[in-house]
Image (cartoon, helix red, strand yellow):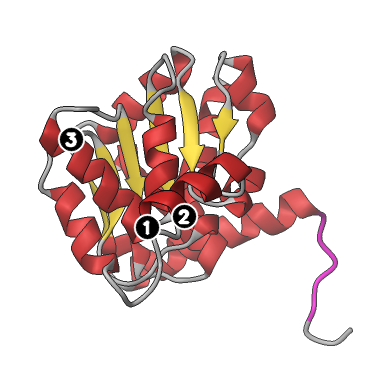
Amino acid sequence: MKGTEHLLPEEIERKSFQIISEELEKRGIRLPEEQERITKRVIHTTADLDYAETLCYSENAVSVLKGLIRSGADIVTDTNMALAGINQRILAGFGGKAHCFMAEEETARLAKERGTTRAAVSMERAAEIKKEVIFAIGNAPTALIRLYEMMQDGAFRPAFIIGVPVGFVNVEAAKELILGTDVPYIVNRGRKGGSGVAAAVCNAVLYELAQT
């Protein structure tokens, strides 16, 4: 068809990343080398160049995240969509497993009994995992708020937080809470985010580690 190109999937991805690099250059944006793969994969997933300026990384965040995955850390998401998007085969190769407790009957039962959200209960259940846990939160700000509360109480300390929930209610405030902690993080400031973004951050690191 006129105006379209016949390209294989790997060619499409390669060309997409080339376009992203060119667009960022036009904007005068130069990404830190350590963060480049993650930020560009998020932009590739969303077609939104604003992430080049709103994604926030704690000191040595990418190195810490790589080290956790290499050592077999698990990943907990707040949606089954994010869970499905993460490359679990590569993760399993390092000894890790991905979890989502949101749709489980036990989570719903506890949330109803206590008058709270399933996201909050899911974070509490994740805290019971007997190994290092990376949290990939793309939908529920209440998940970030509950993690923050548990940290403040001294009840639990996440190994890493990917905080990219999307929306209008409590989203920005929840992200700012995590930005104020000393837990390693990758957080997107503002209203944008989503399950696809959470999975993209995880996959950017997983794909890189799989190639080394």
- Viewer-nearest of discs 3 and 1: 1
* Mark 1 touches mark 2? (CB < 8 Å): yes
Q: Which mark is residue 112?
A: 2
Residue type indicated by callout 2: Lys
Q: Which residues are magenta?
A: 4-8
Relative vertical location of residue 4 with respect to residue 57 in this rendering, above or below: below
The quarter of the displayed image where residue 140 is located: bottom left
- Residue visible at 48% across and 36% down in the picture: 76
Q: Seen in the image, is 93 located left or right of residue 144?
A: right
Q: What residue is shown with label 1?
A: 115
Would you call the spot at circle 3 few (<14 residues within 10 Å), some (14-19), or many (20 or more)? Answer: some
Q: Quadrant of the C terminus?
A: top right
Along the viewing direction, whichever of 204 and 158 lies nearer the viewer: 158
Identify the element where label 1 is drawn: loop
- Residue visible at 69% across and 27% down in the picture: 89
Residue type indicated by callout 3: Met
